[in-house]
């Protein structure tokens, strides 16, 4: 079976065509660095995604502070992680780099602020 992927590891977004047999990567084209192969293998076994979103801030000049995860988490846990993040309300001042959730859902991934408010 041929499957197509858009590598999301870097902004190049290489379009990859991969030949998969019984869930195993046989060959691939379109990637321009070795990370593309690692990405496809991870997609086949344990697809992961990052989250970049915003949380409410009380008492600041802006209503929202942008946040992201420090490491991607399993794709099927994204909605559960978003529920946790949606429940956050921060109080200004909030500094970029502050960890606001340590180890979200038990994964090795923190929610950190990416913009000071
Ligand atoms: S294959 Fe390499 S260059 Fe292409 S998007 Fe992935 S990481 Fe970037």
Image (cartoon, rainbow, N blue to C red):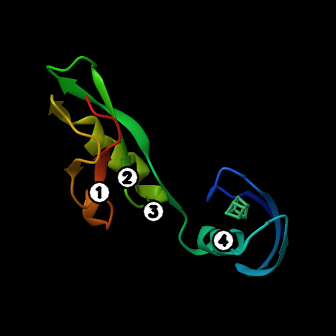
The first of marks 2 and 3 along the sequence is 2
> Which tag, 4 or 3, sits closer to the chain's start?
4
Q: Is mark 4 within 8 Å of ligand 1?
A: yes
**Helix or strand or loop: what does disc 1 sit on?**
loop
Q: Quadrant of residue 86?
A: top left
Is the Cβ of the residue at disc 2 closer than 8 Å to that at disc 3? no
Give the distance between the C-alpha atoms of the residues marked 1 and 4, in whole angstroms.
Answer: 23 Å
Residue lying at 61% horizontally and 59% vertically, measured from the top left? 9
- Left or right of 113, for residue 15: right
Q: Nearer the viewer, residue 110 or 62?
A: 62
Residue drawn at (46%, 53%), measured in percent from left and top?
50
Sequence-first tag of 1 and 2: 2
Residue farthest top in this picture: 61
- Residue 35 numbered tag: 4
Q: Which mark is residue 110?
A: 1
Is residue 58 shown left or right of residue 66? left
Label 3: which residue?
A: 74
Q: Earlier in the sequence, mark 1 or mark 3?
A: 3
Q: Evaluate if marks 1 and 2 touch, with contact meaning CB atoms under 8 Å apart.
A: yes
Position in image of residue 54 (x %, y %): 35, 33
Q: Residue at x 45, y 62 (%)?
A: 74
Comparing 89 with 79, the one in front is 89
Residue 92 vs residue 18, the one in the foreground: 92
- Residue bearing the label numbered 2: 69
Who comes first in sequence, dot 1 or dot 4? 4
How far apart, in angstroms, are the residues tagged by discs 2 and 4? 20 Å
């Amino acid at each position: 079976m041929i499957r197509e992927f858009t590598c999301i590891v870097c902004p190049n977004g290489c379009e990859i065509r991969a030949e998969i047999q019984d869930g195993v990567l046989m060959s691939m084209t379109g990637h321009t660095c070795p990370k593309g192969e690692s990405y496809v293998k991870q997609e086949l076994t344990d697809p992961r995604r990052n989250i970049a979103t915003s949380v409410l801030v009380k008492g600041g000049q802006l209503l929202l502070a942008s946040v992201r995860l420090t490491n991607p988490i399993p794709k099927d846990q994204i909605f559960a992680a978003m529920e946790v993040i949606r429940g956050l309300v921060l109080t200004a001042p909030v500094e970029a780099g502050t960890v606001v959730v340590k180890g979200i859902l038990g994964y090795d991934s923190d929610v950190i602020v990416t913009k000071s408010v």
